[in-house]
Each structure stands twice: as structure tokens, then as C-alpha cells.
């Protein structure tokens, strides 16, 4: 498995020495704590809980969060650097699982009461608790505004009924940031609430078996007259859709970064293999068809990465990038689709065999154009904002 990072002039426009220090620290963590074991974790369908604690102890989980809650403040490119290095594990599932807090905690941070922030953010950043975000429902998919899980006020509690599916870290999560319907049909009747593991009426399915992202535990969640304290409501009632939309912008950026890194690693593996593998008396890299394929792959990876970085810079500067981040996600996913496909093609039969990184990258890649809003939803957003 290749493991390298080169800082070129393009990267230096976005990453400073401070970013590189964080990158180096995460890189060492991955090399020591993840790479020797990640193949076993893939087969197990999860990674050990103690990895959260180790990551929390070194401050990895708190990057970008306020110091008041145990985090380490920094600009958006600290998060990009961490995400890129986590992807160097070669496991999109590990990256998604260890990073589920980055979609579960922002609604609490942005809209929650101080009591909720103090209760539910520090333990997660410390690696003592696992947090998940629960929005998607079995019959809803990308139709967030149509969600049907209800939360009805009953005295000092909300009574929740319904279900969620495809929840990353859902099998082991200690706390779930859950989208529920508290009001009228549509986007204006949605709220967010925190549900703790062990709450009566809250249950979790067995781990869902997926095509890719094996190392992340994924589950369905069920709520059957689940009583949750009203103080666990995040922000005001019926304001949850706003929190979800805020979340989506950075989630889509993270998925674009994951797609670019998936493509970059597949390209690196293909270049290395083409220089080693012989066919018809010469290296694969000696064939013009292979060289041109690699040239096209490299061009796409560089273009997509630069586009994603530029969008990240604007988000970091407070510029609305809803349209552009949707474009970046779609473009990065289409690039990763092509590059992982072509990398497997260059490897031939070996690209279809477990144990080769390109095989896992090819499988893991498929979810990226679905999660965080499908390609089709992204196109709807883009077209409406053009």
C-alpha cells in the first residue's frame, strides 16, 4: 500500500506549516494505529472503540471545534488535511466511522443550548462517546423534507416514533443527533433532538452488510414510544431543517475530499503497478494506451482537487457555496468513478482480487455519489441556483 504526501506549489496556496504539522501528526497516527490492522477491521465490519479514545487523546477528533468544549480551533483546511490523511488508511469506512462526529455534533454546536453543548460535545471529542447523525429514513432517501419520524410533546418529554436507516456509526453510537417531525408536513415542521443509547423505546438493528465502507458500522434505528427529555431539543422547535442544510455544505465538502483522495490513491497504485507489471515483453507503462490513460486520470484528479480546495477556501471565508460545493461533490465523484474504474482495468484480474488496494477503493467509491445527497439531488440544487 502506498503512503505518501507531497506538498507542491498548489497545496501551499491553501496549507501552511501549521496545517502540515497537523497532517504529519495524523499521518503518524494512521501508520501506527490503523494501517497494520485495517484489513482485519474491514473483515470485522468495525474498528475497535479504543481507536476513538486514542484519536481523542491526541486531539484528532477535536480539530476545528472550540477549545471551550475540548476542541482545537482552526480554519477549514485543518479539517481538509485531517480528512485526507484519514483516507490514507485506504479504508473509506474507517474514515467515515471515525469522522461521524463531524456531522453529528455541528447541529448541537451551532444551535444547541449551552447545557446540551457541555453535555454532548466534550465526551465525543475526547473519544469517550460515539456520535451519529440520523436523518435518512427507509422510505425517504434524499427527500429530507418528507421525513416521517415524529416527536410529539408530552409534558417534559418528546415521544418519538419512527425509524432511520443507513446510519453511519449507528450500531455503536452512544448518542444520536436525530431529525424528527414536530410540526406541519414539509421542511418547516422538522426539529433536531439528541437521543441517547439505552433510552427505553430506542433500538438498533444488526450491522448492515454493505458493498463498501466495510469498516464502518452502519445500522437501522427504531423508535417505539421513545421518551426523550424536551431539553434535548436542539435549538427551537421546527427549525431543524435549517440545521440540516448548514450541515450539508461541509458534509458535501468532506465527501468531495474523500472522492478526490480515493481517486488519487487509485492513480498512485495504477502508476506504480504499470511500472512493475510486464506484458508482451515490456512494462505496462511502455504502452502508449496505458500512459495516455494515466495522463487523463492524473489531469482529472488535479483539476478536481483544485476545484474542491477553491470551494473550501470560499466556505472558510464565509462565502455561500451551496451551488459550488454541490458541483465540487458531483465532479469529484465522477472523477473518482472513472479513475477507480480505470485503475482496476490497469490491474486487470488482480484489480478484482481482495487484498489489492484498488479493489477496495473501487468498492468504497460507489457510496460517495449517493451519501450526503445523490448526484441527482446535487444537479437539482445546482440548476435552481444557476
Image (spheres, helix red, strand yellow):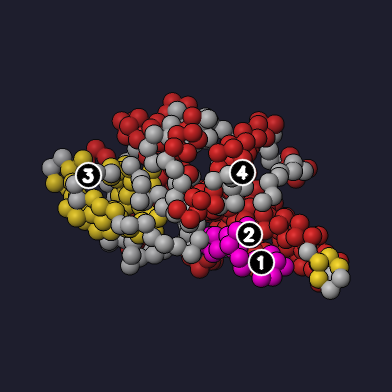
Residue under the image location 86 percent in, 70 percent down? 281
Q: SS at mark 3? A: loop
Rendered location of residue 187, percent (x, y): 34, 58
What residue is disc 2 on?
356
Q: Nearer the viewer, mark 2 or mark 4?
A: 2
Q: Nearer the viewer, residue 284 or 311?
A: 284
Q: Is residue 234 left or right of residue 18?
A: left
Q: Residue at x 19, y 47 (%)?
A: 200
Identified at 24% across, 44% down, the residue is 198
At mark 2, the secondary structure is loop
Residue mark closest to the camera, 2 vs 3: 2
| Res. 73 in view | yes
Q: Which mark is residue 85?
A: 4
Q: Nearer the viewer, residue 310 or 198?
A: 198
Q: Which residue is mark 1?
A: 350
Pointer 1: residues within 10 angstroms few (<14), some, or many (20+)?
A: some
Dot 4 and dot 3 residues touching (CB under 8 Å):
no
Where is residue 223? Give x, y as percent: 23, 54
Residue 363 lies in the magenta-colored region: yes
Cα separation, mark 2 vs mark 3, equals 42 Å
Give me the C-alpha separation between circle 1 and circle 3: 47 Å
SS type, badge 4: helix
Instruction: Determine whether, in the image, residue 162 is placed left or right of residue 65.
Output: left
Spatial distance from mark 1 to mark 4, Cα to Cα?
Answer: 26 Å
**Quadrant including the C terminus:** bottom right
Amino acid at each position: 500500500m502506498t503512503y505518501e504526501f507531497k506538498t507542491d506549489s498548489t497545496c501551499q496556496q491553501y496549507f501552511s506549516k501549521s496545517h502540515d504539522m497537523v497532517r504529519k501528526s495524523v499521518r503518524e497516527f494512521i501508520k501506527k494505529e490503523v494501517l497494520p490492522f485495517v484489513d482485519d477491521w474491514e473483515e470485522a465490519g468495525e474498528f475497535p472503540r479504543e481507536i476513538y479514545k486514542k484519536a481523542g487523546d491526541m486531539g484528532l477528533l477535536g480539530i476545528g471545534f472550540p477549545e471551550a468544549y475540548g476542541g482545537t480551533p482552526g480554519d477549514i483546511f485543518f479539517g481538509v488535511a485531517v480528512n485526507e490523511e484519514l483516507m490514507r488508511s485506504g479504508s473509506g469506512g474507517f474514515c467515515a466511522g471515525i469522522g461521524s462526529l463531524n456531522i453529528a455534533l455541528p447541529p448541537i454546536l451551532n444551535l444547541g443550548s449551552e447545557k446540551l453543548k457541555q453535555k454532548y460535545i466534550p465526551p465525543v471529542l475526547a473519544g469517550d462517546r460515539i456520535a451519529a447523525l440520523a436523518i435518512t429514513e427507509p422510505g425517504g432517501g434524499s427527500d429530507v423534507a418528507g421525513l416521517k419520524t415524529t416527536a410529539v410533546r408530552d409534558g417534559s418529554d418528546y415521544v418519538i416514533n419512527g425509524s432511520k436507516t443507513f446510519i453511519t456509526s449507528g450500531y455503536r453510537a452512544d448518542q444520536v443527533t436525530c431529525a424528527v417531525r414536530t410540526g406541519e408536513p414539509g421542511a418547516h415542521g422538522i426539529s433536531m433532538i439528541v437521543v441517547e443509547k439505552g433510552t427505553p423505546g430506542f433500538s438498533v438493528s444488526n450491522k448492515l452488510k454493505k458493498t463498501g465502507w466495510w469498516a464502518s458500522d452502519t445500522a437501522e434505528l427504531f423508535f417505539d414510544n421513545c421518551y426523550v427529555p424536551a431539553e434535548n431539543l436542539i435549538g427551537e422547535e421546527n427549525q431543524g431543517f435549517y440545521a440540516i442544510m448548514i450541515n450539508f455544505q461541509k458534509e458535501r465538502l468532506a465527501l468531495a475530499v474523500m472522492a478526490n483522495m480515493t481517486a488519487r490513491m487509485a492513480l498512485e497504485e495504477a502508476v506504480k503497478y504499470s511500472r512493475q507489471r510486464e506484458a508482451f515483453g515490456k512494462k505496462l507503462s511502455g504502452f502508449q494506451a496505458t500512459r495516455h490513460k494515466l495522463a487523463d486520470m492524473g489531469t482529472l484528479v488535479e483539476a478536481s482537487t483544485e476545484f474542491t480546495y477553491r470551494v473550501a477556501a470560499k466556505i472558510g471565508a464565509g462565502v455561500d457555496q451551496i451551488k459550488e460545493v454541490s458541483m465540487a461533490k458531483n465532479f469529484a465523484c465522477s472523477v473518482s468513478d472513472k479513475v477507480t474504474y480505470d485503475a482496476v482495468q490497469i490491474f486487470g484480474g488482480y484489480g478484482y482480487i481482495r487484498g489489492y488496494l484498488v479493489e477496495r477503493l473501487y468498492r468504497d467509491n460507489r457510496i460517495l455519489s449517493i451519501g450526503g445527497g445523490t448526484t441527482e439531488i446535487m444537479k437539482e440544487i445546482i440548476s435552481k441556483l444557476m
